[in-house]
């Protein structure tokens, strides 16, 4: 959200999960209030806390509807999709059309991440990679270094 | 807060180049908000939690904004988790990432 507000001429895409949104529900009214038109949010909702060893249902496995909370928080265009065809349609229109977008994609829980190799990029390195990309594409310095 | 002090505070932020402020109002410093709202130099982002105030400021900082987070003192504790995480990813030598809060003496 901060990046979208800071760079209003760029399109910013956020990839989220049900656990992450549930942890920070206060983001939704703020998003509905600030309403950055260049932000597109995709929430992949597997209805589970799926860790390296555990799998426990999240609130969305019961009655919680993230898209409904988003709509009632002022994010008018918040939808839930439950199959690939609808996801492709919503993803395409959300990205192409102007305005704040919010798509909740119901997905099956998988365990592929348990076999994924650990990244060798640490957080600081990741930050510099990202900011140098923003600097290059924006044509402005952001990190100047000491002195 | 005396209007003169509020004005000094806002001018100080401006002089420091702060152009993006996340805010969750409290009692003692909130007189700075109308001043910043009237000044197009500042981009204000009202938030519902101090934790997201830190996160949003962090994102704006990565986009080149000079940021500060305005919150009440207890908000610093609310934002601890996000601050520690953002601190690891956002540490930078050349720019400010400020917290603006009232410290009651005693």
Image: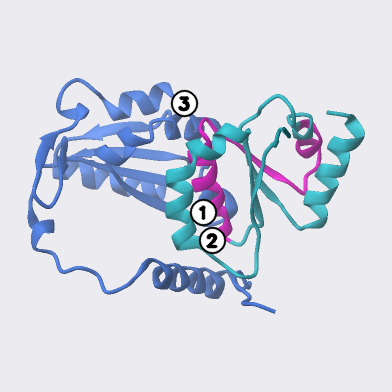
Chain colours: A blue, B cyan
- Taking the view exactly as shown, the residue that stands out farthest to the right is B4
Circle 1/circle 2 CB separation < 8 Å: yes
Q: Is residue B105 magenta?
A: no
Picture layout, residue A56 above or below residue A110: above
| CA–CA distance in space, label 1 to label 2 | 5 Å
Question: Considering the numbered disc 3 on the image, is that residue within a helix, a strand or a loop?
Answer: loop
| CA–CA distance in space, label 1 to label 3 | 22 Å
Residue sitting nearer the eye, A4 or B24? B24
Q: Which mark is residue A97?
A: none
Name the side, left or right, on which A49 lies relative to A32.
left
| Residue A127 place in picture, x, y as percent | 45, 67
Name the side, left or right, on which A62 lies relative to B52.
left
Please, which chain is the residue tagged with disc 3 on? A
| Residue B56 place in picture, x, y as percent | 52, 46
Name the side, left or right, on which A143 lies relative to A100.
right
Q: Which mark is residue A74?
A: 3
Magenta stretch in the rendered image: B34-63
| Same chain letter for marks 1 and 2 | yes
Picture layout, residue A59 above or below residue A110: above
Label 2 sits on residue: B62
| Same chain letter for marks 2 and 3 | no
Answer whether residue A39 is visible to the viewer in this image: no
Q: Which mark is residue B59?
A: 1
Identify the image quadrant of residue B26: top right
Please, which chain is the residue tagged with disc 1 on? B
Question: Considering the numbered disc 2 on the image, is that residue within a helix, a strand or a loop?
Answer: helix
């Amino acid at each position: 959200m901060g990046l979208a507000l800071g760079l209003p001429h760029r399109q910013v895409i956020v990839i989220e999960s049900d656990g992450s949104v549930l942890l920070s529900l206060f983001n939704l009214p703020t998003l509905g209030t600030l309403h950055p038109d260049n932000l597109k949010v995709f929430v992949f909702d597997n209805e589970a806390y799926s860790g390296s060893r555990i799998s426990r249902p999240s609130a969305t496995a019961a009655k919680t509807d993230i898209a409904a909370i988003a709509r009632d928080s002022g994010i008018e265009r918040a939808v839930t999709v439950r199959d690939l065809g609808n996801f492709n349609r919503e993803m395409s229109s959300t990205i192409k059309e102007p305005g704040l977008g919010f798509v909740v994609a119901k997905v099956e829980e998988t365990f592929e991440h348990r076999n994924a190799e650990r990244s060798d990029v640490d957080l600081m390195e990741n930050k510099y990679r990202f900011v140098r990309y923003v600097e290059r594409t924006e044509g402005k310095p952001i990190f100047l270094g000491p002195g | 807060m005396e209007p003169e002090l509020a004005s000094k505070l806002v001018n100080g932020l401006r002089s420091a180049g702060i152009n993006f402020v996340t805010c969750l109002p409290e009692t003692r410093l909130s007189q700075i908000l109308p001043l910043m709202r009237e000044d197009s130099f500042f981009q204000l982002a009202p938030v519902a939690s101090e934790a997201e105030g830190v996160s949003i400021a962090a994102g704006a900082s990565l986009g080149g904004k000079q940021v500060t987070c305005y919150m009440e003192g207890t908000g610093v504790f609310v934002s601890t988790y996000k601050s520690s995480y953002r601190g690891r990813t956002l540490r930078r030598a050349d720019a400010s990432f400020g917290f603006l809060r009232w410290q009651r003496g005693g």
